[in-house]
Amino acid sequence: MTTMTPETLAAYGRLVAACAQLEDILVWCGGDADELETHAGRLERAVAAMSSSLPVADTGTGDPVAAAAADPRTGVRDRSLQPPFRVRREDASVLSGEVRFRPHFAGVGSVHGGSLALFLDDMVGRLANAPEGIFARTAYLHVDYRRLTPVDEWLDYELRLDRVEGRKRFVRGEVAADGLVLAEVEALCVHRAPGAVG
């Protein structure tokens, strides 16, 4: 069993960051067949080495890295699923900051719509779960794509708690560049009833 010490988490973060760089390279790389075959072989050997040498950490949670983090969504456990983002303001009613969609998240000439939706869903959930003791899941997510979203630029995002109706938490927000709205989101999250599982 691997103990998730601060040093282990830092090393894991470095590994995740290297994988993120590889994802970006795969978007833009060229080369001839021989070059691509050479690099494919190197990666296959690295994967084989990691598969045979890295122990599977078992803490009883099924996800030891997430278990070691206060909030796995904001730590190294992101596994490059989310683009890099920074938080400017975070409280029970507003979550805002900056996000940069790396080349890995590109579609054709702009950020892929699914990448935008995934990021917004995660931020919606983060805001909906802000009050202590709340565990809300997304029940509805609607994204309006207003303009093409540029790749590899820092953009502004802001999510606001629109209203609360019982266990329902309604969230609205947007991603913008220089004050120009690129995408808007409207979402409903429902927090788990007392005693409910899942």
Image: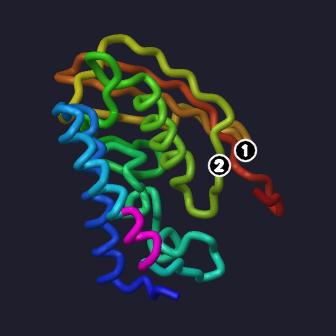
Q: Percent from the top left, x then y, of residue 53?
A: 42, 79
- Numbered disc 1: secondary structure: loop
Left or right of residue 172, residue 180 in this image: left
- Which residue in the protein does label 2 denote? 136
Closer to the camera in the image, 129 or 12 = 12
**Principal secondary structure, stretch drawn in magenta:** helix
Closer to the camera in the image, 188 or 52 = 52
Mark linked to residue 167? 1
Taking the view exactly as shown, the residue that stands out farthest to the right is 195
Closer to the camera in the image, 154 or 54 = 54
Sequence-first disc among 1 and 2? 2
Amino acid at dot 2: Ala
**Viewer-side label of 1, 2:** 2
Q: Is residue 45 magenta?
A: no
Which residue corresponds to the image point at 20% horizontal and 39% vertical from the top-left? 34
- Numbered disc 2: secondary structure: strand
Q: Which residues are magenta?
A: 47-53
- For disc 1, the neighbor class at 10 Å (few under 14, some 14 to 19, many from 20) is some
Which residue corresponds to the image point at 36% horizontal and 35% vertical from the top-left? 158
Mark linked to residue 37? none
